[in-house]
Amino acid sequence: MTPTNTRAATLLIMALFGLQPMALGAWLAMIPYIKETLGLSKGELAVALLGMPVALIPTLQIASRVVAKIGPRKIFAFLLPVQAIIALLPFIATSIPTLFAALTLLGAGVAFLEVSLNTYAGRLEKAEGLNIMSRCHGFWALGVGVGSFFATMLSGVGPMTAVFIISAVSGVAGAWAGLSLPRLVGEEEAARSTPRKFRQMPRALFVIAMFVFSVTLVEGAMSDWAAVYLAERWGGVAEDAGIAVTVFACFLATGRFMGDYMKGRLGPRGVARLTVGLALVGIGCLTLSTSVALTFIGFAFVGLGASVGFPLGISAAASLDDSHEAQNIATMAMIAMCAFLFGPPLIGFVSDIFSLRVAFLGLFPGLCLAFWLTNIFPTR
């Protein structure tokens, strides 16, 4: 690939990482609105939120095979516009089962897009000797933050209309960017590779996945419950509480934009330990908070702390094999997504019995495990 094509590929994949989650961010900001409109308790909302993991987790392995065969570009061109429609389905839900079904479709679409994004970025890193994964995921977090911010700002035109505007614009732009991605060396070999069984996969993949699982559990909890937690603490309009998602996502993005630089300075193990430590401080701020200001500080620290876990895991998984990147990434992502998507419903069940403060405190042991598992990463 020429330097011009390498630069184009880098810029386009980063743009796609930012565009794809804007619809998701818009939906996350509207969770308090959906909860209020349908009159759901936190436990009932938790049941409905299970729709995404129920679809996403098994779909990841299917997605890895499809992406390996037809390539990420075609997935982007087709599914990003479709996601714009699927993102509206929760707003026409009338009950827990219909909301669950809507989120099931959304989860299936996200699975294909996530595997496509990470597979292309992982191949590009290896093929061109780049270090871009953390920044790519920084754009993903920024996309969530931008989506939640504009959904909150545009809620005056109607929550459903606001989400449609955001998801339609990002979907069309993403389809164009996907079709413009240069073809990478090695895609043909990946398309001909035979999928491996779980027992054939390297053990290191599952250790990496456990680290990412522990960190992603925190990211998922904040993404789905930050707005609800702030609404309870703040007592303002439900739609305005979406700013909590914006704060968390923006600091998540900041950490990821700094991640590649910090990785070069501290090494993978050093940056992993630093960020997990910040997440522990953030959880402490949230659970001990006596003011809205300290709550925002907690969201900021947790955002920074959860920032590089998933990008570190993706790069490590992709580097384990030259012909099974999509399957390695999908397997690791499947385990990590169990935390990202099953974690929030679990938080809901615990908070229904006790409180969100107690539920957030339950994230502390997992972060301690993640700190210990940082030994899987090299020092340099």
Image (cartoon, rainbow, N blue to C red):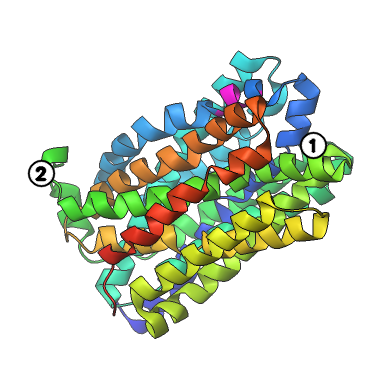
> Residue under circle 1?
159
- Residue identified by numbered label 2: 200
User: Which quadrant does the N terminus fall into?
Assistant: bottom left
Residue 6 makes an appearance in the image: yes
Residue type highlighted by circle 1: Pro
Residue at coordinates 68% horizontally, 20% vertically from top-left?
93
Q: Position of residue 83 (x, y in %)?
A: 56, 39
Toward the viewer: 246 or 309?
309
Is the stretch drawn in magenta largely helix, strand or loop? helix
Quarter of the image with the C terminus is: bottom left
Residue at 57%, 35% (x, y): give it. 347
Q: Residues within 10 Å of mark 1 (few under 14, many from 20)?
A: many
Name the residue: 63% across, 39% down.
358
- Of residues 264 and 65, the one nearer the viewer is 264
Q: Which mark is residue 355?
A: none
Q: Report whether 200 appears left or right of 183.
A: left
Q: Position of residue 129 (x, y in %)?
A: 28, 78
The part of the image, by quadrant, that contains residue 330 is top left
The x, y position of residue 141, in whole percent, is 57, 58
Is 313 placed left or right of 230 in the picture?
left
Under mark 2, the amino acid is Gln
Q: Which sits in the foreground, 34 or 15?
A: 34
The boundaries of the magenta stretch are: 45-49
Query: Measuring 12% from the left and 40% from the top, which residue is drawn there?
Result: 199
